[in-house]
Image (cartoon, grey):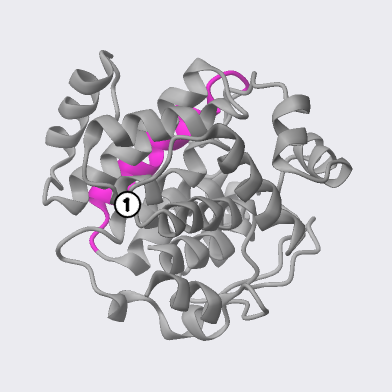
Amino acid sequence: MLLEIAIADAYGAAFEYLDNQIIQQYNNGYSYRQHQLHRLIPGSFTDDTQMSVAIYEYLKDHSFKPELNKNKIADYFYNCYARDKRKGYSSGFQNLLDSISSGKELLEKCNSVSSKNGAAMRSCPIGLLNDTKLIKEFAELQASITHNERGITASVAVAIATYLVRNGKDSFNEVSDYLNSFLGLNEDWLYIEEVRSRDDLGMITAKSAITFALHSRDFHHLLIDCVSVGGDVDTSAAIAAGIFSQRKDYDRSQIPANLLKKLENKEFGRDYIIELEK
């Protein structure tokens, strides 16, 4: 899961909010490229992967029977960033992370009002748990550190969708019906438009990721599909890849060799992620 998230994140980062003409020209699903405006080295992943790693490490350290402790979760968020500071976070949140020295300070100073996709982007690993009640509680708790009710709902949706796909429910209609029933909603989960919104980016991103995770025919085309719509495509692609990685018809031979080889491999890069997953 984490490897797929990192590759999709790094691939999508080159296309984030670019014009459709550029996306159509370069979105081939086989190679990383330089973003026109950002200085991120091609093959580098962003906050989407780093925060997913933080959640995964928390779950692993608790033997996937997590303690619902908001303070400790915040510590993992802060420590994961502090040991490997990188670009990709929103400027306000990154400035906050750079100004603090603990998860405790993160909880004290963070305004939990965002409806964007930062909570949803780190929720796929939560779907590796085996109890939907626990998944919901944990997804809500970790999201509440930074997000409001709508952002929290997006986090739960991603985690539950991951759980459902991991347990063989990979029909889009089945997953969307389950999500509406489980969350008490009446949402249209099919979303193939640009991933952009001022007010509801978390849910829009979750919908886009779930749509492509359940409709794309293989990992290579998943990347192309997610990026093709434009907008915040590194996050939607990363989430979609996390969900897609749990499909019964998926294996890692689907990853284009060039993307695997050229994924960043510093101290907490490709090899660290692969070993962490073991």
Camera-side residue: 244 or 69?
69
Occupied quadrant, residue 35 = bottom right
The vertical placement of 5 against 174, above or below, is below
Q: Point out residue 7 in the picture as x, y percentages from the top left corner.
A: 50, 68
Q: Is residue 150 left or right of residue 158?
A: right
The vertical placement of 149 against 131, above or below, is above
Q: Is residue 143 magenta?
A: no
Tell me which amino acid carries mark 1.
Ile
Residue at the spot 23% in from the left edge and 61% down from the top edge: 217
Residue at which label 1 appears: 243
Quadrant of image for the N terminus? bottom left
Query: Magenta: predominant secondary structure element?
Result: helix
Residue 30 in sight from this viewpoint: yes
Q: Point out residue 267 in the picture as x, y percentages from the top left corner.
A: 67, 78
Q: Point out residue 226 in the picture as x, y percentages from the top left corner.
A: 43, 51
First to last magenta residue range: 198-217
Q: Point out residue 255 in the picture as x, y percentages from the top left corner.
A: 37, 76
Q: Is residue 155 left or right of residue 101?
A: left
Q: Is residue 9 left or right of residue 113?
A: left
Residue at the spot 12% in from the left edge and 45% down from the top edge: 169
- Secondary element under disc 1, as helix, strand or loop, is helix
Residue at the spot 51% in from the left edge and 64% down from the top edge: 6
Q: Is residue 212 magenta?
A: yes
